Image: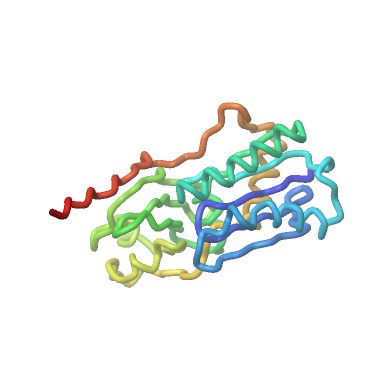
């Protein structure tokens, strides 16, 4: 039996679940349009433990969504996960955010393109087949009318995630299906983290860093012109 705490904070959806052998026992989520992770994450952790009837000492591993995604969200989630691993002396499991997001839908054919908003017309995306096998690497890309055309010309393509809405305005093809309102969640992480646990596929807690995909850039504040 493996009790795994799953933490997802890469988007505006702050999500925590507790699972036993890949089956979710309790889950807490909040997506209020803001990044409230710093305020609610640790409360959610306590809530799912209480709801499932487990003490922290019973946790066998902590899984965290590793990105890509919001820089601040990733830092908050990974910091909390690493802190718990150090305190409880349990292993850390990392889950690819786009892989977990692809599990939000079931497709009998075609491909699944989970995508996260990366500002303006850019998204973080990957491509999976209907069996959730990744067939194209993760990219940060600017969307235009030719994006994903090689997949669209062959079969139906399901676009989902918070980057899908703006793509709907640009990608016009009969094979394009946009599944809106889907965010990465700790619910889908449960099965994936259990698979990794059974394979002993763990991270080095001391050295693990989130997968940002792009460097974090601080835009300097414009200097005000002096008034004479």
Residue sitting farthest toward the left: 228
User: Which of the 4 quarters of the picture holds residue 81?
Assistant: top right
Colour option used: rainbow
Q: Horizontally, is 180 left or right of 140 in the view?
A: right
* Residue 131 on image: x %, y %: 54, 53
* Residue 64 on image: x %, y %: 61, 44
Residue sitting farthest toward the front: 228
The relative height of residue 204 versus residue 172 in the rendered view (above or below) is above
User: Which of the 4 quarters of the picture holds residue 197?
Assistant: top right
Q: Nearer the viewer, residue 37 or 180?
A: 37
| Image quadrant where one finds the C terminus | bottom left
Q: Nearer the viewer, residue 218 or 24?
A: 218
Q: Horizontally, is 56 left or right of 7 in the view?
A: right
Q: Nearer the viewer, residue 149 or 10?
A: 10
Q: How many marks?
A: 0
* Residue 150 on image: x %, y %: 30, 55
| Image quadrant where one finds the N terminus | top right
The relative height of residue 65 versus residue 91 in the rendered view (above or below) is below
* Residue 117 on image: x %, y %: 39, 58
Q: Horizontally, is 46 left or right of 220 in the view?
A: right
The relative height of residue 74 versus residue 209 in the rendered view (above or below) is below
Q: Residue at x 55, y 68 (%)?
A: 32
Q: Residue at x 46, y 69 (%)?
A: 179
Q: Nearer the viewer, residue 146 or 122?
A: 122
Q: Residue at x 73, y 39 (%)?
A: 61
């Amino acid at each position: 039996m493996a009790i795994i705490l799953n933490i997802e904070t890469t988007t505006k959806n702050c999500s925590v679940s507790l699972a036993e052998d890949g089956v979710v026992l309790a889950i807490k989520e909040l997506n209020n349009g803001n990044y409230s992770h710093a305020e609610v994450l640790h409360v959610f952790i306590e809530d799912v433990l209480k709801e499932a009837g487990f003490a922290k000492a019973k946790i066998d591993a902590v899984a965290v969504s590793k990105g890509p995604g919001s820089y601040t969200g990733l830092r908050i989630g990974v910091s909390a996960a690493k802190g718990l691993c150090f305190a409880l002396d349990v292993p850390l499991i990392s889950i690819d955010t786009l892989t977990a997001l692809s599990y939000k839908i079931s497709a009998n054919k075609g491909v699944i393109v989970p995508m996260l908003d990366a500002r303006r017309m850019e998204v973080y995306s990957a491509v999976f087949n209907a069996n959730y096998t990744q067939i194209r690497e993760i990219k940060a890309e600017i969307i235009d009318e030719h994006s994903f055309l090689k997949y669209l010309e062959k079969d139906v393509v399901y676009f989902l995630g918070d980057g899908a809405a703006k793509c709907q305005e640009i990608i016009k093809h009969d094979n394009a299906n946009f599944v809106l309102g889907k965010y990465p969640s700790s619910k889908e992480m449960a099965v994936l983290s259990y698979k990794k646990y059974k394979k002993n596929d763990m991270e080095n807690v001391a050295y693990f860093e989130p997968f940002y995909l792009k460097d974090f850039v601080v835009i300097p504040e414009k200097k005000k012109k002096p008034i004479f």
